[in-house]
Image (tube, rainbow, N blue to C red):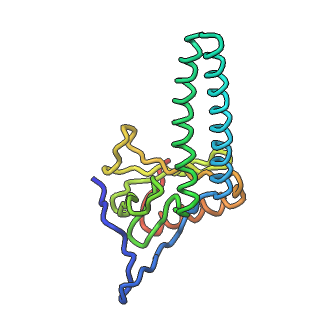
Amino acid sequence: MADLSKPDLQNKEGQEAKKFELEVEEDRKRLILQAVGMLVLNIALLFVALGAWAAANITGNVLLLIVILALFTVVWFVSKGMGKRFNRFATKVHVVDFGPRDVVIYEKADPEKALVVPYKKVKNYKCIRQGNSIRLLLAGDWVKHPSGFQLVDINRPFMASTLDGLQADIAAVMKAHRVNERN
């Protein structure tokens, strides 16, 4: 089971002070472009649904009503994805932070719901470089996925030049905390 306690974020005066050795940020250009693209797609789908509704009224074709229901379903799912990306863009939440004692994984845009795992509970890790992204796989007893790995997807199409240094920094932090790299 993962240690879901909050990382040590307060100093002696009670003020919030983030003490992370390495902070991995989101590619903000990617987030905003994906969100705006989904907004445009939603508007286009709504116009297609409006056209299908008008055509169904004129022709009396019942199949067009099924098309309208399918379009509204797609609009709903695209809206959820768009909202997640706009939310991550607005809250400026990182992908993952490596603290002095814990790895903080931000699966959602809410920093209060971050997954906090002590280094001693991480059995091993693996960094897989795929194009403009790094797939960080963390293994341990706290992982709920059947594969035994927690995936941390660091996707940076507009910050691809930073990935080599980031991969080296992740390896250095993990080595400093005695977490072995999986072969």
At x 54%, y 30%, the residue is 72
Which is nearer the eye, 93 or 65? 65
On screen, residue 175 above or below 42: below
At x 57%, y 27%, the residue is 71
Query: What percent of the width, then of the height, locates residue 136?
Result: 51, 51
**Side of 165 relative to 123 (left or right):** right
Which is nearer the eye, 91 or 60? 60
Which is nearer the eye, 160 or 123? 160
On screen, residue 139 above or below 17: above
At x 34%, y 44%, the residue is 144
Q: Which residue occupies the extreme left position in the image?
A: 1
Q: Which residue occupies the extreme bottom position in the image?
A: 13
- Total marks shown come to 0
| Quarter where residue 42 is shown | top right
| Quarter where residue 149 is shown | top left
At x 54%, y 67%, the residue is 23
Query: What percent of the width, then of the height, locates residue 30?
Result: 66, 52
**Side of 89 relative to 15 (left or right):** right
Query: What percent of the width, then of the height, locates residue 154?
Result: 57, 53
Query: What percent of the width, then of the height, locates residue 163?
Result: 65, 58
